Image (cartoon, grey):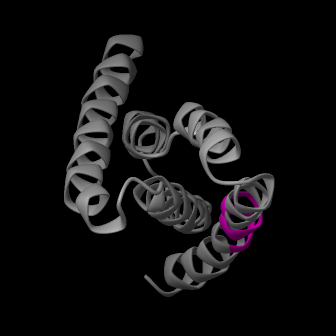
Amino acid sequence: MIVKNILAIAAGGALGTLSRYLLNAQTLPLWNGLPVATVLENLSGSFLLGLLTGFLIHRQTKEWIKLGLGTGFCGGFTTMSTLASDTLFMYSIHSPFHSGIYVAISLFGGIILAYAGVLLGEKWGQRL
């Protein structure tokens, strides 16, 4: 059981990290170095994790699936360390104002989207 959980987390993490890289590769050239991809990753990852959480509350799901999707994929797709690094970059290159806006959008947007995901996931989980 532990081995299956670890393998699911590793596979999900690899897919999440690869997805994050591909989103960065597609987005970075369009925004001239601004951390738009990190915002998109963290906001969509927050929504997805909320959606999964809300849905799985109402489902009998194997632990390895929950771990692979939540801890693995969502954990690999979202990135706190890049958020921190980008915040410092924006502070030093642009302005404290831009840095603050970036953090506020990331933090409050993530919380709001996670909550919306939980609500939608619960409705979805109850219907199926």
Q: Which SS type dominates the magenta stretch?
A: helix
The residue shown at (55%, 64%) is 43
**Image height check: is 59 above or below 125?**
above
How many numbered discs, if any? 0
Residue 61 placed where, x, y %?
44, 50
Q: Does 110 lie within the magenta span?
A: yes
Quadrant containing the N terminus is top left
Residue 27 placed where, x, y %?
28, 62
Quadrant containing the C terminus is bottom left
The residue shown at (58%, 82%) is 120
**Image height check: is 1 above or below 86?**
above
Residue 119 placed where, x, y %?
67, 79
Residue 67 placed where, x, y %?
45, 36
The residue shown at (69%, 67%) is 105
Q: Which residues are magenta?
A: 106-112
Q: Between residue 54 and residue 46, name the one nearer to us.
A: 46
Q: Is residue 56 found left or right of 100 in the rendered image?
A: left
Q: Does 71 lie within the magenta span?
A: no
Q: Is residue 12 found left or right of 117 in the rendered image?
A: left
The residue shown at (79%, 52%) is 96
**Image height check: is 112 above or below 70?**
below
Q: Is residue 105 found left or right of 9 in the rendered image?
A: right
**Image height check: is 86 above or below 121?**
above
